[in-house]
Image: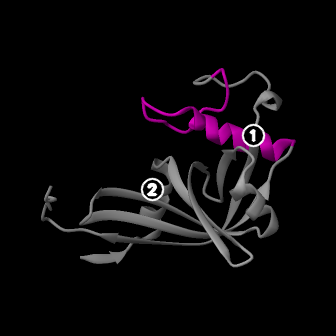
């Protein structure tokens, strides 16, 4: 069965996942890349290094964000968000973003790209020492879909 996630299911998925994908588009060139994130009900918070996605989002702040929970190819949930990129250079908004990123629950095994600094898993005493580009995506529109089946599918090797 394929269907739509209700609002509670959409919120639950966004609150329990830590990896999503950002899609951005500039000058007829589209780019989709995975990124770790935190969600507060209004914004998707992220930290990144300078690179193509940051350059593109600075030129065109209208982005798409996707997060999913996939058990197998026949049992999955996906949320798609249309949103607006906003870079957080200093002040309360940046500190709020870092607070949300710090309190998310990460898997025991995680890469350094999900860590916010050398003090991880502990918070830095001074958020200003945390490098990279801190940004948020204002959620403008969100929708969710799912597929659910009782069958288990096995892949041929």
Q: Are marks 2 and 1 in contact (CB under 8 Å)?
A: no
| Pick the front one: 100 or 69 | 69
What x and y, as percent, mark residue 121?
A: 57, 24
Tell me which label, 2 or 1, sits earlier in the chain: 2
Mark 1 neighbour density, 10 Å: few (under 14) some (14–19) many (20 or more) = some
Q: Start and end of the magenta stretch?
A: 90-119
Q: Is residue 96 above or below residue 135?
A: above
Q: Quadrant of the N terminus?
A: bottom left
| Pick the front one: 24 or 136 | 24
Count of labels in the image: 2
Q: Please give left or right for residue 148 compared with residue 143 in the image.
A: left
Label 1: which secondary element: loop
Q: Residue at x 62, y 52 (%)?
A: 40
Q: Residue at x 12, y 65 (%)?
A: 151
Image quadrant where residue 33 sits:
bottom right
Q: Assess whether residue 67 is covered by the magenta stretch.
A: no
Mark 2 neighbour density, 10 Å: few (under 14) some (14–19) many (20 or more) = few
What x and y, as percent, mark residue 24?
A: 66, 68
**Which of the numbered marks, if any, corresponds to residue 50?**
none
Q: Assess whether residue 110 is covered by the magenta stretch.
A: yes
Judging by the rendered image, the residue that carries numbered circle 2 is 12
Q: Please give left or right for residue 41 compared with residue 128 in the image.
A: left
Judging by the rendered image, the residue that carries numbered circle 1 is 132
Q: Nearer the viewer, mark 2 or mark 1?
A: 1
What x and y, as percent, mark residue 93?
A: 80, 47
Q: Residue at x 41, y 63 (%)?
A: 9
Q: Please give left or right for residue 85 compared with residue 105 in the image.
A: right
Label 2 to label 1: alpha-carbon separation: 28 Å
């Amino acid at each position: 069965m394929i269907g739509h996630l209700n609002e509670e299911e959409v919120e639950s998925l966004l609150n329990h996942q830590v990896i999503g994908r950002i899609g951005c588009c500039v000058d007829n060139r589209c780019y989709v890349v995975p990124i770790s994130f935190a969600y507060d009900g209004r914004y998707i918070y992220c930290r990144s290094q300078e690179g193509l996605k940051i350059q593109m989002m600075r030129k065109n702040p209208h982005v798409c964000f996707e997060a999913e929970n996939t058990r197998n190819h026949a049992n999955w949930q996906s949320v798609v968000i249309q949103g607006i990129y906003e870079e957080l250079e200093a002040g309360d908004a940046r500190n709020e973003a870092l607070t949300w990123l710090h309190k998310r629950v990460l898997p025991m095994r995680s890469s350094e790209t999900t860590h916010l600094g050398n003090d991880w898993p502990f918070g830095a005493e001074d958020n200003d020492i945390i490098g990279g580009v801190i940004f948020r995506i204002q959620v403008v529109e969100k929708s969710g879909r799912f597929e659910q089946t009782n069958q288990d599918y096995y892949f041929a090797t």
